[in-house]
Structures are given as structure tokens and as C-alpha cells.
Image: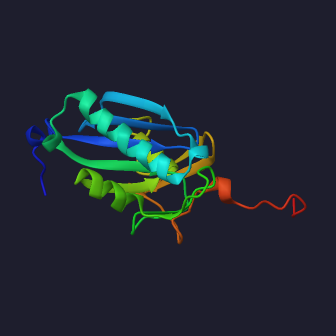
Amino acid sequence: MMVDKKSLEKKYSIGVDLGGTNIVSAIVNYQGEILHIIKVPTYTERGKEETIKRIKNIIHKTISKSEVEQNNIIGIGVGAPGPLDIERGIINFAPNLPGWRDVPLREILKNEFNREVVLENDANAAAWGERCFGIGRGVDNLVCFTLGTGIGGGIIIDGKIYHGNNYGAAELGHMTVNKDGPR
């Protein structure tokens, strides 16, 4: 299916990076150019419900500050710490977000904004961003490592995110290492 670039010129997406330290929200055009970005502390110590409220608020603020018409926003992408259930849009467990077990974040945001919402592992989202708009542009196979409050990795194989059996293919921060193991 051919996509008319003219029809995309006035379409925008919201990207959210949910981290243990900060929440970042940006509105981007179809070329990946950031039009407006906002960063706020996550305040994980205030609990899951407060963090969800902060996510909603930062998205609303990003939309209003960007001056983009709401009907031109085609969707919201959220990069979140994992492990996640990508198919159902659920954060199974987020070690840097206390109390986050089986949180249906995609459904919560879809109900709030009436837009399509994609939930993806934060490191996979970073890898995809690099493939589409960054150093990996035009490359079909790449590995991206992320270092922040947590440690993660994203893998792109044949131009697609590789999730592995349990959606944790490059979850480096969740790998167990036996210090007395074979060398």
C-alpha cells in the first residue's frame, strides 16, 4: 500500500519515555522531527496511580503546548521498562517503578486520549528510533544498548523488532550472571 507523503505532512505522533527517574513526552512529525518536548520527574515514591496521572498530564500538556490540532494526532507510542506483554499492552513488572505489576497502560491511555496506543519496551523503542531516524537509518539489522535508571537493549533483525519468546530478548538488566560460573 502506497502512502501519500502529502497526507502525512499534517499528521503527528506523541512519544512517551516512561523511566524510573523521568517521564519525557514529545510530539513528532512523520519525519521524526521533534516539535515540542516536555520532561518531568517520575516521582515513583508517590505510587503507581500518581505516576499514571503524571503520564496523562504530560501528554495533555505536550498536545496543548505544541499547538497541533488534536485530530491530526494519529497515535501515542510509549516506551516503558519491562518485562511487558506487548500483545495486550500491559506492563508485567517494572523494577524501577515500585508497585507496577500487570498495569494495562495501553488501555488506560487509549481510554484517556481516544487514540491508538502502542506500548513497547523502552530499549526496543530506542532501537527502532535509531533505525528510522538516527544512526541506524537504512540498516535492517542492529543492536542498541540503553543505560539509564536501568540497563536495556533492543534488537532489530530484518527491519523488525526482535522480541524473543517472552518479549525480553535483550533485557540485559534482567539477566542472571553467576559470578562463579565457567570462564
Relative to 119, is 168 on the left or the right?
right
How far from the left and from the top, in percent, is residue 77?
Answer: 35, 49
Q: Which of 43 and 91 is in front in this view?
A: 43
How far from the left and from the top, in percent, is residue 51?
Answer: 49, 47
Q: Nearer the viewer, residue 86 or 161?
A: 86
Taking the spot 25% from the left edge, 32% from the top edge, the residue there is 64
Taking the spot 63% from the left edge, 46% from the top edge, the residue there is 150
* Residue 28 appearing in the image: yes
Q: Nearer the viewer, residue 86 or 136?
A: 86
Taking the spot 42% from the left edge, 46% from the top edge, the residue there is 53
**Quadrant placement of the N terminus:** bottom left
Relative to 115, is 8 on the left or the right?
left
Q: Report how many numbered discs are placed on residues in the image.
A: 0
How far from the left and from the top, in percent, is residue 89?
Answer: 40, 63
**Quadrant placement of the C terminus:** bottom right
What is the basis of the colouring in this image?
rainbow
Relative to 38, is 182 on the left or the right?
right
Relative to 48, is 172 on the left or the right?
right
Q: Nearer the viewer, residue 122 or 134?
A: 122
